[in-house]
Amino acid sequence: MYVSPQREPLIKGDKNYSKITEEITAPMAGKPGKYWYLGIGISTIAILLGSVAIFMTIWFGIGTWGLNKTVGWGWGITNFVWWVGIGHAGTFISAILLLFRQKWRTSINRSAEAMTLMAVMCAGFFPLIHMGRLLLGFFIFPYPNTRGVWVNFNSPLLWDVFAITTYFLVSLLFWYVGLIPDIGTIRDRATKKIKKKIYSLLAMGWVGSARHWARHESLSLILAGLAAPLVLSVHSIVSMDFATSVIPGWHTTIFPPYFVSGAIFSGFAMVLTLMIIARKAMNLEDFITIGHVESMNKIIIATGSIVGVAYLTELFVAWYSGVEYEQYAFLNRATGPYWWAYAIMMTCNVITPQLFWFRKIRRNLAATFIISIFVNIGMWFERFVIVVTSLHRDYLPSSWTMYKASLVEVGLYVFTLGLFFTLFLLFIRVFPVIAISEIKSVLKSSGEKKIEK
Amino acid sequence: MKKITKYISAFYEDEEDLLIGIKKLKENNVNVLDAFTPFPVHGLDKALGIRRSWLPRVGFIGGAIGALTGFFFQKWVFTEGYQMAIGGKPFFAIPSFIPVTFECTVLFAAFFMVFAFLFRSKLGLGAENKIYDLKITDDRFVVVAGFDENKSGEVKKQMEAAGATIIEVKE
Amino acid sequence: MKLDLPFLPARRVVSLVFLFTFFFICNLQSPGADPSGSDHGVSRADLRRGERFFKGLLPFDIKHESCISCHNLKASDSLNWNPSAMEIAIKYASRDFASFEQVVMSPSGKKMSEVHQGFEIEREDLAHVKSYLDEMVQTGYPQENMEVMWLVGLILLILIVFWALIELIFVKKIKPRIITVVILLGSFGWLTNILYTEAVALGRQEAYAPLQPIKFSHKVHAGLNQTDCFYCHNTAEYSKSAGIPSVNTCMNCHLIVREGTNSGKFEIDKIHYAFDNNIPIEWVRVHNLPDHVFFSHAQHVGAGKLDCKECHGPVEEMDVLRQHSDLSMGWCLDCHRTHKVQFIENKYYSSYKEFHEQIATGKIDSVTVEQLGGTDCMKCHY
Amino acid sequence: MEKKYYKSIEDFKGKNGSLLLSEKAKGRHNEPVTTSPSTRRDFLKLFGFAIASAAVVSSCEQPVQKAIPFLIKPDSITPGKANYYASTFYDGNDYGSILVKVRDGRPIKIEGNELSSISKGGTSARIQASVLSLYDTGRHRNPIRYGEKSSWDEADKEIIEKLNSIKENNGAVALVSQTIISPSTLAVIEEFKKAYPNTKHIQYDAISANGITAANQKVFGKDAIPSYHFDKAKVIVGFGADFLGTWLMPVEFTKQYSKGRKLENGIKDMSYHVHFEAGMSLTGSNADKRVVIKNSQQKLVLANLYNEIAKESGADVINVGQSPVDVSSLAKRLLLSKGNSLLVCGSNDVETQVIVNGINYLLENYGSTIDINSPLQIKKGNDSEIAELTEQLNNGEVSGIILYGVNPLYDYQDKEKFQAGIKKTELSISIPNLKDETAEECSYLCPDHYILESWNDNEIKKGFYSLAQPSISPIFDTRAAQESLLKWAGLETEYVEFIKKQWETNIYPNAGFSGSFYDFWNKCVHDGVYEKPLTNETQLNYNANVLAAGVKGVKSEEYELELYESVAIGDGKQANNPWLQELPDPVSKVTWDNYANISLQLAEELELEEGDIIKIEDKLTLPVLIQPGQEYKTISVALGYGRENAGTVANGVGGNAYPLVSYSNETRQYSKAGVKFEKLEGEHEFAKTQSHHSMEGRPIIRETSLAKYLEDPASGNELHEKIEHHKTTLYKEREFKGHHWGMAVDLNSCTGCNACVVACNAENNIPIVGKEQVKLAREMHWIRIDRYYSGDAKNPEVVRQPVMCQHCDNAPCENVCPVGATTNSTEGINQMAYNRCIGTRYCNNNCPYKVRRFNFLDYNNADAISNNEYDPAGMTVDLKRMVLNPDVVVRAKGVIEKCSLCIQRIQEKKLDAKLENRPLADGEIKPACVQGCPADAIVFGDLNDENSKISKFFKDERNYHLLEELHTLPSVGYLTKVRNTEA
């Protein structure tokens, strides 16, 4: 078979279709290893610990957090934006890279999409829990009621409700539609009766006929076409939570593109963090190759640089605007009491990814892993800087305060981390982490060697 | 039309063999019914002569419905449902309605398409389509044709020629 | 970053967890059952005999109706003018048998003496009835649980929905699937409907018609006797609350009117009892608004010149006062959107110059509450 | 405004039982209440749809609500309508003619009585808060005998027996009372003395003004405090007298002072105010020129000033040392305004006050700005008498002591000695109206009614009467002090009858009233005041010989201590009032604490930081607060804190500084030179409502000088014109067809006294969050007074600005609420529907003014979850809940709240106008802050009415809007502050 000499193979080793099926479904068969148990144990404990924080928040109120009269949002919204950002990689990979016909996406899109769903779940948790009256949270939906009142469609927070809900549902559809053929594969390989029954149900009667495939491909393409602007819109709308306000440091037109690139940046970093562990733990080195890692690192440099430029642009515009409030807000970010957060943000987001200009580092797993963690931390601090430092010193100096997170807020963050990893660990046990059918379709063109039977 | 009761199928190990096989059968006016593959094979729909899917059109209609619903619902809420003076804006403040309209468009389009796909392909929870062979979802490429007693020998030969490993006749 | 808990020490958290567990366990235990048996020195047999007599179950020569035919046992005697068994029991619980006998055998009121005329009851039987009634004060009303059946029905409905789903997806026994689909949709729709109506009614009490401590009839007072609403509810025109009449207002008439055509003396005696003993009458509020709603009668009746009936309905036809409207916010808004204010008549509105000009030019003929801000949040919520 | 604003001190340093029961006992006065304390219904409401299914299953029924009408309705009470009763507040320290708003039998709010020519409708924070003290849970509920609950009969019997036995044994009885301004009470005491001639009546003030009275005695032969008229003064000089906050009659003085400084109705002149002081006081921070001197230098500076004036006036010069500050220009200015100037001094030193009298005399101020012929009746206490009594008590010379309304075991400098003295008496009786440290040490505790429960007549100045009438029947088994005294004197009469008799014989005949006494009395009770100023002008006998022979210079290296009354707590009588405890100090913005104010230089020198603990004179341990404008070596400490037995709220808050009061020259001295202090281990965090003190050069508070203002009325406010000029808008501005409510604050009049803050607390049921929550910056006040410093940190200029919701027409908060809980009304009010709010706090974030407040915890015990209330001040107990305004909903945990411009008052007045078939009058609607303001600094009205006062204010060239460059179009305006300075 012909293999492009210019490109490095996306699938390594001697493979045929059957072998691919075999190797990708291998982690799902048999008993999970001790590391899996360790992982799920830790993440379940995190969920339990976090549940105490949830209880405290609902029972005693937001007063258990460190917020005050001036800083109305703290860790809660920081975490929300962070998780939404992470939730951008999956759909970006599967939708936009599909539209750009990037074949290397096939190895990572499934797990990235799953990660998206989990991250969006974690993200959606925060706007709910940060409500003062969670039990009345249903007020936020425009449902007919005897009070005759509706919601406020002017509010970016309401746009968020629509954006996040839509994003979650469309991503879920996209992910599930892509999963159907692979569930069919598992169903046909299943030997236990219950397992077979369940996967039959989930496969929805997939038979792999040419007509199914034709429609499936058409559906995937259009969904990708829809999801692509959706991905861009979601973080744009999240950024409008800040951009449409009047608070200096929030009221910035650059936010939508800046947030989207930041989101993809952090999303890819999170995917890398997970993938580097997963390929090792699940013996998927042949499918997720150094080449994949390198491709993703290239996107990280690109988006990281956009983010860096955005940071500088913000500073420039603040100075150039001549508005004293704006100027002070940015001066305060860099040199005020929260300078350390700004410094962490700058170091982790702007400086560390630049190391990826070196091919050696780009192709080094350990380095990539460390830098991806750095980026995750940096992006968390970016949101912290935006949310907290803009609020804590705004217009009237009489109301300036400091904000310190409480243990309860940390607990809620721990809860979402636990939830995320629990779901991910369950996911790798029940569904194939790599899109089997898609990998098969690129085996010939991008495989290292296809062996004949 | 006569109802087909018996099928003849050929199992290939490579998608190119399958395509060649289908092409040959078609050339000989064999009633090729369907093909089953583990992954979408490029050119298969053309070889089988499957019409282009109208899912995009469903998507467009869904999107249009979503956009209109979203926009006019917002308009109704603010101008008739309950007039609320918000931030000095007029009741009918179009720029504020754009994000929700957009989200509704995408949401409706996606749901319309997915349900159309499931409906058209007869897929769904509890759907029981006949699984032709368990290996299809693994590495087998199968072409199924109507079985005609008169032509069976010829068809088999053509199938073998294209590289079929197994040839079956099923009721 | 230094992390700390603003005000909750760990100790308090732990104690809370304990508290919860404790309450949970407490709730598991069923409430203490009431020990049966009488403590008045009356045997159970006698009580039982009294009960049977009261209910007319004893084999004796009945010239009159049994007690229960007029004095019912259940709480829901909304349209029975006669005092219920419980009311009699409470009234005579602290009095001796002689006074009870006196009233039963030779009543003074007109209505009662007509019915009780020529009673021939053994003294012993009457004593049993009295002790039965005394017992009733202790044990309370005979309870009947209406909810169980309904609850079973609801659970059944939920089960049907589940069954239909399982049938549709897994079992597939019933061939024409349309049947299952119809069952599923039907039961699901019904269930949704129940939940919806209950959810809408939650916190609301349309048609609420509670029993009052006195069987006061608006039909008699406002309907037959044509008493003006403001005679009793005299602050409606100038105060936030319409005012529930104080007992001395009742006494203006009932100093003379001591026996009612329907209820005899029993009900009116309650007013006198309250007046003589300085015990206020605890009426049950029928129209309840949530605390976060500010409603002023003066605004609606005094300034807006609304008729009482527009909200309270045909009160003059109600023996038992019933909440006529649902008092939902949507209901308020409907009226505020359509109702016209006393725009020209009331000089307060003279500052609304634009509307006055429009009226003068004939552009509009009236002004609704909404046009003057009647749908503003702070019209009612502050 | 090219001023250097510095950020914070760190930066400067170069670093970074219930009423219902008693009512029932009275029989026929049951108020109509809905009795359902359970919040079950709310619980269901809250869960709403979410638990619909659960509700269906459990089939929850609505809990039955009861409606209990009156048995016999009193004519005066209409359920749902408020009554106002004229009354008087006087607690021995503060005085005000008031109206008590009574709703359904409960006093819920105090307003100023506009008929009084003294307070003219003004109130102070402490007077506004006093309604809450009525419901103080610490109040004594019955007579107590030797620590055991007792009955009045028992107590009376034993007291009378003991008093008689003392009389028979020729023992002495001391009746120690607060200064009594009630002629009837004085008559009662005379009756008591008649029955027990061995009684000596001593008046005792926690904050003494004996220095002034003694000086007047010496100079003019009049043992009295004169009346002052700050409104008539063109030049006002203050020496350590916080007359706008705490000194003598702050409400009256604020009225007068602000009147003399208003630039409205074409008046283009204002008084010039110079203030000499050591610690930064409210008055000092309002002065046009503030001069920092030590308290020990007061006499020296005054003597120099005297000499400067004497030189010009031809009087004898005294022999003095060099003045630390130059007073010659001030002397010139004073001489220019001869007869129209006023010099007041807060010192309690007789010699100092003598010089003050001398200066005022030379300036011919007597008869114009000072009126010694109708003297103030407050603070008549003689410090030597109480000192003498303490000695006599300890020598066993006094057999019986009656303590009426005084608390010497808290506020006497040598309280241990006084306590030991009480222990030596045969009979000790206390008559307190609030819980205090002294009462329980006495063998008999005979609780007095609270002020709002009692009858009284008060003669604040000769001829100016103000009656107090009960606005609620006594909540507890208390008895009027006067009735107790009469009873022990053997007279069985109700005190109100006694007063009537007094009035009938003493006042009515001279009143020249045409009707009967009955009519006269009813009119006086209705109006609350009866004023008949004395007209007899008597010649002053000026005795210049008493002026000190010489005043020496002072040692500058010694540390000095200054004790002052804080604006919130005063002398400490109402310390158990959570509204006052949570009130931020107008200067330091600290709540729930007192502290040792030290200067920046001293802090640097001694390496002290804010929150460090010091011990002063081995008597008092306090945290340090670094106060700009503090004199270099003076430590200022607020009195009134450190209560030990005042109730759960006040106990243990701050430290008691009264033991540091010294006694010298026969007066109690509140400042002292040569104090020692040491630093202790430990750190203290203050509960401050404002931690940043600079405006950062932002045009938040705009100010100008009088000279510039006279040139251009818009000076300092040029930005307003510029912004108005640049105004462009995408959407058309909103039209308001009927009313368009607006509010304006004259920054020139506002002194920052905080009366509005407490008035708002009371009116709008604002929760008290406690010290810990204030530390977390979660105070709930709807109106706050921002205070910024500018200029020299050693003596900065201070500006203040009350900030409430600005009710923007283009409100940023409205845009962002996802559920539309906050919208704009057709009358221009930014509305907040609490019951719609889900608590995202987005509106709060997006409010540039940060006026929205979030219920972080269940402060009101009003949410669906039980056992989670956070109520450090016990505000949710039934007794204290009686102070709640039933027209304003109590907010639950998790909702945002904010100023509503007192919408309940707007609606009430609109309804009144509709019912009376008339248009609304301008000024008829008064939000609580407007009503309570003693300086008339806040104006409210209809902007659509061209002739309204608010419209005139908005058209004034001084008017601007806060952060108007954001185009939020606020309905609140501010008038620039004008300082009477040249530059």
Image (cartoon, coloured by chain):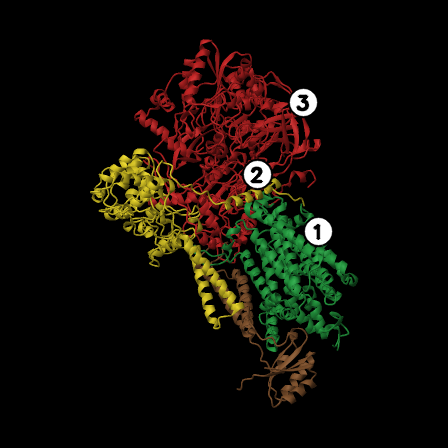
Chain colours: A green, B brown, C yellow, D red
Query: In which chain is the residue bearing label 2?
Result: D
- Nearest the eye: B28 or D325: B28
Q: Secondary structure at mark 1?
A: helix
Whether residue A139 appears in this view of the structure is yes
Alpha carbon distance from label 2 to label 1: 38 Å
Q: Three-letter amino acid code at disc 1?
A: Ile
| Label of residue C138 in the image | none
Disc with the residue nearer the chain's start (3 vs 2): 3
Query: In which chain is the residue bearing label 3?
Result: D
- Name the residue beneath numbered marker 2: D799
Q: Three-letter amino acid code at disc 3?
A: Lys
In terms of image quadrants, where is residue A372? bottom right
> Compared to D917, does D157 lie above or below?
above
- Name the residue beneath numbered marker 1: A344
Q: Is residue A241 left or right of residue A373?
A: left
Crowdedness near tag 3: few (<14), some (14–19) or many (≥20) residues, C-alpha within 10 Å: few
Q: Three-letter amino acid code at disc 2?
A: Val
In terms of image quadrants, where is residue A230? bottom right
Q: Is residue B102 left or right of residue D109?
A: right
- Name the residue beneath numbered marker 3: D555
Query: In which chain is the residue bearing label 1?
Result: A
Pointers 3 and 1 within a single chain? no
